[in-house]
Amino acid sequence: MSHTHHDAHAHDHGTQQPAPARPAPGPTLLALPAWQRVLLVLPLIAALWLAAWWALA
């Protein structure tokens, strides 16, 4: 009985994990570590800042 419960739990977890990961890349981005999110956002901020500085200069 314990083995059946463990098998059902493992099967449910295995089916549930890859399903939301493929169609929605948004949650994956939110699940990234803070430093990876900073590395992804930093180039955008730098580009906007350089564009504004170049336009004002």
Image: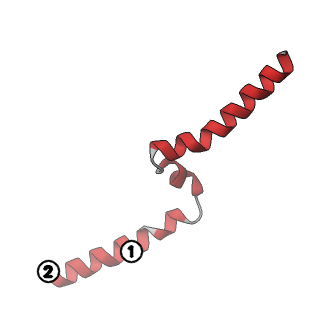
How does the figure colour the protein chain or chains? secondary structure
- CA–CA distance between discs 2 and 1? 18 Å
Residue kind at label 1, given as amino acid type: Gly
Q: Position of residue 52 (x, y in %)?
A: 79, 22
Count neighbours of disc 1 (C-alpha within 10 A) and say few if under 14, some if 14 to 19, many if 20 or more: few
- Above or below, 41 against 16 in this view is above
Which quadrant would residue 10 be assigned to in this image? Answer: bottom left
Name the image quarter holding residue 51. Answer: top right
Precedes in sequence: disc 2 or disc 1: 2
Q: Is residue 45 left or right of residue 30?
A: right
The disc labelled 2 sits on which kind of residue?
A: Ser
Tag 1 residue: 14
Kindly indicate the quadrant of the structure image that contains residue 40. top right
Spot occupied by residue 8 in the image (x, y as percentages of width and height): 28, 79
Nearer to me, 24 or 32: 32
Residue in front for this viewpoint, 40 or 10: 40
Nearest to the observer: residue 2 or residue 48: 48
Tell me the element at label 2.
helix
Q: Residue at x 43, y 67 (%)?
A: 17
